[in-house]
Image: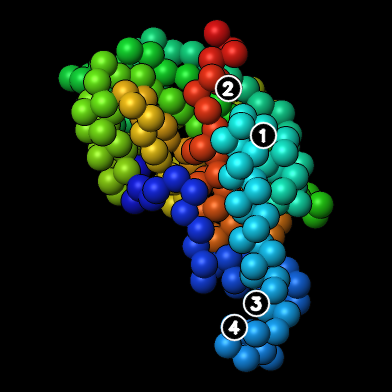
Amino acid sequence: MAKGKGAGTILVAGALALAMASAGEDSSSSGPGTGSGQVVANSFAARVAASQAAAARGDITGAARQLGMTAGPRGQRHNVNCAAVATGEVRDHLLTHPCRGMDRLLFTIRDSGGGTIAIAVAWLDFATPAQARAFRNIDDAPGTGQINPLPGSTAGIPNVHLTGRHHRSRQVSATAVSADAEPVAAGAQTDALLDEVAGIAVLLPHIYAQSSK
């Protein structure tokens, strides 16, 4: 897929640029560490932290709201055969190291200008933590394939193509969690924002997806 990052990573430089752009600030107008640009950046970081906390509770609506966005439709599905919905080296790995089961979630968040982001999350259960770690090593590497997202129709959008540019993963015991964010409709979706969204989505608890079983 793409380079894996730790869950909840805040990209400080990107967040600063995004926050200042959204507030119409010029980075040259304030001295280092002072002025309204720094205040806006701190505010954005606080909103990201609040969104992360909401996601960790399984509150998608609240997580989106903290970013000034609205959560849209979502689709959920349980799969027994993980390799059947994977591609590339990720699929090859799952054929030789099968998972015990997988839950996938696809949902959207949108901004006030109509910009929409699709978010795909997958929880893969393995027999041991070492197997989950081995899967992450493959899934996080660039160009190794992916876990396909659910059909777009499950979330009321066209089918989503995952580029791997905005990918995050984490591990909870023997469960590997993979999350990707992709823009669907044009809006103020900077790379920094999409990275943050993926980092927030990967914190969603596994039990959230299990409700679809």
In this view, the mark in front (3 or 2): 3
The residue under label 1 is 60
Any part of residue 158 in sight = no
The 10 Å Cα crowd at callout 3, few under 14, some 14 to 19, many 20 or more, is some
Instruction: Give the CA distance from mark 3 to mark 1.
Output: 28 Å
Residue at numbered disc 3 = 38
| CB atoms of marks 3 and 4 within 8 Å | yes
- Mark 2, other Cα within 10 Å: few <14 / some 14–19 / many ≥20: some
Query: At x 59% / y 71%, what residue is drawn?
Result: 16
Residue visible at 73% across and 80% down in the picture: 36
Is residue 173 shown above or below 69? above
Badge 4 marks a residue whose secondary structure is: loop
**Residue receiving disc 4:** 33
Residue bearing the label numbered 2: 208
Q: Secondary structure at mark 3?
A: helix
Q: Earlier in the sequence, mark 1 or mark 2?
A: 1
Secondary structure, mark 2, is: helix
Residue 203 horizontal side relative to residue 6, left or right = right
Q: Earlier in the sequence, mark 3 or mark 1?
A: 3
* Sooner in the amino-acid sequence: mark 4 or mark 1: 4
